[in-house]
Image (cartoon, rainbow, N blue to C red):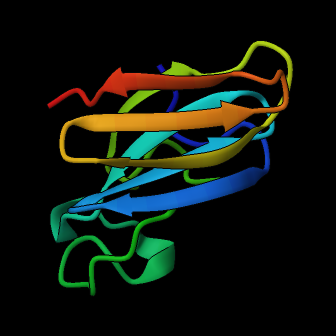
């Protein structure tokens, strides 16, 4: 399981209280915007403003990772979006994929 990005973030979208981020290694991660999941580097966490830390050295703490999946086998996830119950990602491999968003 991953606690943070392993590559640069190329795309970001916000769906309700979830931040989706696509990275250069083909991963699509979902992080909670819930204040209880904030990262100390962003002022979130206990008593903070609910910031979400999506990259760098989070040492597996905070960031509110909800789920992650491989959205591309051959490049970066360049575009992410969605609507109620659906997530879409487009990547360097020329694919656009749609998933039911895990609850």
Q: Position of residue 24 (x, y in %)?
A: 80, 38
Q: Position of residue 63 (x, y in %)?
A: 40, 55
Q: Taking 85 as reference, is 9 above or below it?
A: below
Q: Is residue 22 left or right of residue 91?
A: left
101 or 34: nearer the viewer? 101
Determine the image quadrant of residue 95: top right
58 or 103: nearer the viewer? 103
Q: Is residue 29 left or right of residue 31?
A: right
| Quarter of the C terminus within the rendering | top left
Determine the image quadrant of residue 49: bottom left
Residue most toward the top? 73
Asked whether residue 56 is in view, the answer is no
2 or 91: nearer the viewer? 91
8 or 97: nearer the viewer? 97
Q: Is residue 35 left or right of residue 80?
A: left
At 50% from the left and 21% from the top, the residue drawn is 69
At 56% from the left and 59% from the top, the residue drawn is 12
Q: Taking 7 as reference, is 61 above or below it?
A: below
At 63% from the left and 43% from the top, the residue drawn is 22
Q: Position of residue 93 (x, y in %)?
A: 83, 21
Q: Position of residue 74 (x, y in %)?
A: 85, 17
Q: Taking 5 as reference, is 19 above or below it?
A: below
Asked whether residue 9 is in view, the answer is yes
Q: Is residue 8 left or right of residue 49?
A: right
Q: Taking 74 as reference, is 83 above or below it?
A: below
């Amino acid at each position: 399981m991953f606690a943070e990005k392993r590559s640069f973030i190329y795309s970001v979208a916000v769906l309700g209280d979830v931040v989706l981020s696509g990275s250069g290694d083909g991963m699509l991660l979902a992080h909670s915007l819930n204040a209880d999941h904030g990262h100390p580097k962003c002022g979130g966490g206990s008593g903070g403003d609910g910031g979400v830390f999506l990259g760098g050295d989070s040492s597996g703490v905070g960031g509110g990772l909800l789920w992650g999946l491989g959205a591309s086998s051959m490049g970066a996830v360049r575009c992410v979006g969605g609507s109620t119950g659906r997530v879409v990602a487009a990547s360097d491999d020329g694919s656009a994929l749609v998933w039911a968003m895990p609850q």
